[in-house]
Image (cartoon, coloured by chain):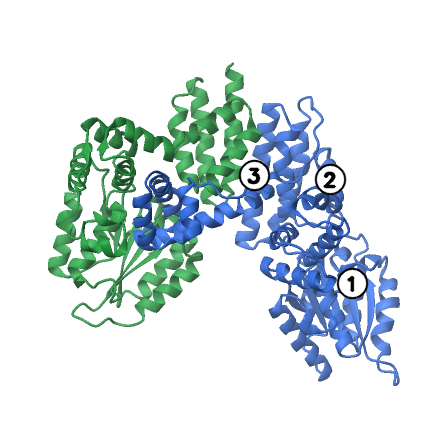
């Protein structure tokens, strides 16, 4: 057991196995190469890290900062994380940026790095305001914006950033990495179990490692069944159930489940829409009807982005689906 | 029996609950008057119902020994009436021997709805010539016909009272009345009041009258006592045959549009059983949601007027496309859901915040992506759970919540 662990308790493995250096990153060779080049020249631009969840965006930013500033990059306030979805509005973010960016830090590198995580959660207006902040403080501060979708970042910001794309992690790389962790933790894991993890997590390393650690809490011997036990616990197929309720016309029950998902489980509306998008293809309706439903889905997506209430917009969408289904029968 | 809203009405300005900023700006306006040189002769206090607009004026008058001439603007039929009542009062204060006075004109927004717009201009004239302070009170001052008044008056905005403030005020009343009432019930009353202190006090008194104060009494009694009005408004909304009907359905309803929207939205699936009609109604409600959100987000109050037709006449038209069955109206299930899950949500948020601090992600991401896995470990492996609790610095209640598989001790 690591010394650290005895002192602070059991670490979540996503922290314990977070890459400390760029060389420890899984996959993402191009991103790593670019970041290493930047380290050599010390000419750090504003950067936008875009890519699916769990592909190493935040992790590589930390690794980069550690290599740039040294091991105390966090405690010395040289690298600061701000989470767009936790801060109430752009005003709070600007205040925070101001606080850190006001002064030139000690040391050979004359700027701090501010990481704005989940920056695609900012509305367009907020992004425009943030763009001005970027300019105002660019002398003392470099920004790394992290986002799942770069198209949700307005062009003026994109054009001021070096855009680094993180690709979904390939199956073999994820399985190899999970295998290493399993070995280090003294687990006896079957290859079918590793495949099952990948099938569920679809290249999301954070999710994969979480599943592995949860499975390890039941037994040192991990097989497929153990993995399914974990998956069944964390994801009870609720999106499908939501659609089934909707499709059979049980709208008030669908509404209750929707509330459970949104307000209690904290499911992101955009994730719900993506899941519904996936299910539409499987529905037993005409192709033309599918087109119309996808159109309605796009409309709901847009309205939510515009500030519409997710519960209301999604329920209206589900009732449209139900209507199509009834026409078909 | 005197209503508690009167019994506990503030006697002094310092006793006015909440809205400190508004109180400050009112006092500085009043100070200008007592110095004899007001920059604006009238003040327009506006904001939702039951947040202390009138109470502030009465408390101020009481503290400073002023007579209050109270008039209700919706009583003004004509311009002559305005001059007769307000005009006279606004001149007499200078006669020696009389106590100083302040004029309080309530429900000024009622003037805007009247056909005889003469009322507004008459009131403007009175303000120009007045020798005593005039306070206008309105819920919604943004009607175009009130533009002139907005210019002439010092605008002072009142906001909804913070929930915690409502709770602590209710506690004081309980103490004064010698009532035992759990925090939970007070919180629930405050929740329902939606920042309207008057209605919260009314609810408390109504419940106290039943003898037992518990969550159950609240559920059975509270809603009915207060919401008789809203049920008839709902019935009118779901049956509105014209845009005008829709508007009339809401007239006189002491509730903001956002809350009324929730009532309509939550009752719609029960009211409309035909799926075609229901889909149509929900789409109209979804459109109305956009208008509402834009209204508040862009602060464009003019957009508000597009909401009512959609959520009344629009929903009613959809409903009547198919045979309907009878269904009772009920209290918004959303509000009930949120209050039933409050403990749960607070607990999850606390835990997620602690996870977020250690795992480099946002609270919301920790909530949906990490928390379920942590709960899995906690409910399957006590030893690892203890280790993790140490790492994340979870307290006892958080540990037991996680170990029970995210089931809160109370439902």
Q: Which mark is residue B287?
A: 3
Q: Colour of chain B?
A: blue
Is residue B156 positioned above or below B100 on the image?
Answer: above
Residue B322 placement (x, y as % from top left): 66, 22
What residue is shown with label 1?
A: B6
Lower position in the chain sequence, tag 3 or tag 1: 1
**Total numbered circles:** 3
Cα separation between marks 2 and 3:
23 Å
Q: Chain of mark 1?
A: B
Q: Colour of chain A?
A: green
Viewer-proximal residue, A69 or A183?
A: A183
Q: For the point 67% across and 73% down, which residue is it?
A: B14
Q: Is residue B22 left or right of residue A75?
A: right
Q: Quadrant of the N terminus of chain B?
A: bottom right
Label 1: few (<14), some (14–19) or many (≥20) C-alpha neighbours in 10 Å = few
SS assignment at label 2: helix
Is B23 situated left or right of A59 in this image? right
In the rendered image, which residue does mark 2 sit on?
B231
């Amino acid at each position: 057991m690591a010394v650290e662990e005895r002192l602070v308790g059991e670490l979540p493995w996503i922290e314990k196995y977070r890459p400390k250096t760029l060389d420890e990153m899984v996959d993402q060779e191009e991103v790593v190469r670019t970041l290493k080049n930047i380290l050599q020249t010390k000419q750090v631009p504003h950067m936008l890290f875009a890519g699916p969840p769990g592909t190493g965006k935040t992790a590589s930013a930390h690794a980069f900062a550690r290599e740039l500033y040294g091991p105390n990059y966090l405690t010395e306030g040289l690298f600061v994380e701000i989470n767009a979805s936790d801060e109430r509005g752009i005003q709070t973010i600007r205040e925070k940026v101001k606080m850190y960016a006001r002064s030139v830090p000690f040391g050979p590198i004359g700027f701090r790095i501010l990481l704005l995580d989940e920056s695609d959660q900012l509305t367009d207006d907020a992004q425009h305001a943030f763009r001005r902040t970027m300019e105002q403080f660019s002398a003392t501060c470099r920004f790394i914006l992290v986002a799942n979708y770069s198209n949700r970042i307005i062009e003026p910001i994109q054009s001021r950033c070096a855009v680094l794309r993180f690709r979904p992690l390939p199956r073999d790389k994820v399985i190899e990495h999970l295998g290493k962790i399993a070995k280090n933790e003294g687990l006896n894991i079957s290859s079918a179990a590793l495949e099952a993890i990948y099938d569920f997590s679809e290249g999301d390393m954070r999710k994969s490692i979480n599943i592995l650690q949860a499975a390890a809490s039941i037994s040192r011997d991990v097989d497929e069944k153990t993995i399914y036990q974990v998956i069944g616990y964390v994801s009870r197929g609720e999106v499908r159930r939501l659609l089934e309720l909707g499709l059979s016309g049980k709208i008030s029950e669908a509404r209750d489940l929707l509330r459970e998902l949104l307000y209690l489980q904290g499911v992101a509306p955009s994730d719900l829409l993506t899941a519904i998008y996936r299910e539409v293809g499987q529905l037993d309706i005409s192709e033309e009807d599918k087109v119309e439903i996808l159109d309605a889905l796009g409309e709901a997506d847009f309205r939510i982005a515009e500030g519409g209430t997710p519960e209301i917009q999604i329920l209206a969408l589900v009732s449209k689906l139900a209507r199509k289904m009834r026409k078909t029968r | 029996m005197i209503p508690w809203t009167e019994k506990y009405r503030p006697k002094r300005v310092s006793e006015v609950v909440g809205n400190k900023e508004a109180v400050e700006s009112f006092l500085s306006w009043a100070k200008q008057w007592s110095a004899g040189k007001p920059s604006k002769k009238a003040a327009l206090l506006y904001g939702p119902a039951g947040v202390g607009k009138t109470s502030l004026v009465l408390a101020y008058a009481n503290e400073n020994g002023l007579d209050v001439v109270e008039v209700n603007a919706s009583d003004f039929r004509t311009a002559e009436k305005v001059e007769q009542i307000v005009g006279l009062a606004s001149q007499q204060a200078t006669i020696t021997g009389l106590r100083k006075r302040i004029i309080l004109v309530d429900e000024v927004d009622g003037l805007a709805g009247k056909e005889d717009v003469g009322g507004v201009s008459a009131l403007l004239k009175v303000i120009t010539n007045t020798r005593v302070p005039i306070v206008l009170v309105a819920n919604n001052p943004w009607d175009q016909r009130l533009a002139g008044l907005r210019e002439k008056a010092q605008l002072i905005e009142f906001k909804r009272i913070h929930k915690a403030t409502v709770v602590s005020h209710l506690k004081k009343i309980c103490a004064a009345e010698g009532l035992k009432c759990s925090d939970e019930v007070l919180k629930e009353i405050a929740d329902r009041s939606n920042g309207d202190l008057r209605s919260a006090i009314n609810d408390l008194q109504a419940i106290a009258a039943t003898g037992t104060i518990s969550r159950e009494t609240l559920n059975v009694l509270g809603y009915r006592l207060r919401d008789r009005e809203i049920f008839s408004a709902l019935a009118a909304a779901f049956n509105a045959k014209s845009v005008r009907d829709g508007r009339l359905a809401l007239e006189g309803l002491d509730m903001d549009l956002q809350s009324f929207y929730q009532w309509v939205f939550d009752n719609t699936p029960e009211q409309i059983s035909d799926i075609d009609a229901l889909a149509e109604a929900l789409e109209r409600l979804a459109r109305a949601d956009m208008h509402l959100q834009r209204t508040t987000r862009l602060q464009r109050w003019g957009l508000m007027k597009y909401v009512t037709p959609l959520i009344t006449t629009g929903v009613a038209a959809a409903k009547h496309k198919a045979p309907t069955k009878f269904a009772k109206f009920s209290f918004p299930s959303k509000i009930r859901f949120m209050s039933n899950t409050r403990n749960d949500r607070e607990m999850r948020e606390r835990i997620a915040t602690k996870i977020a601090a250690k795992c480099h992600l946002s609270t919301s991401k920790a909530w949906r992506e990490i928390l379920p896995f942590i709960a899995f470990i906690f409910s399957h492996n006590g030893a690892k759970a203890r280790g993790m609790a140490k790492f994340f610095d979870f307290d006892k209640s958080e540990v037991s919540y996680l170990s029970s598989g995210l089931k809160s001790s109370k439902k």
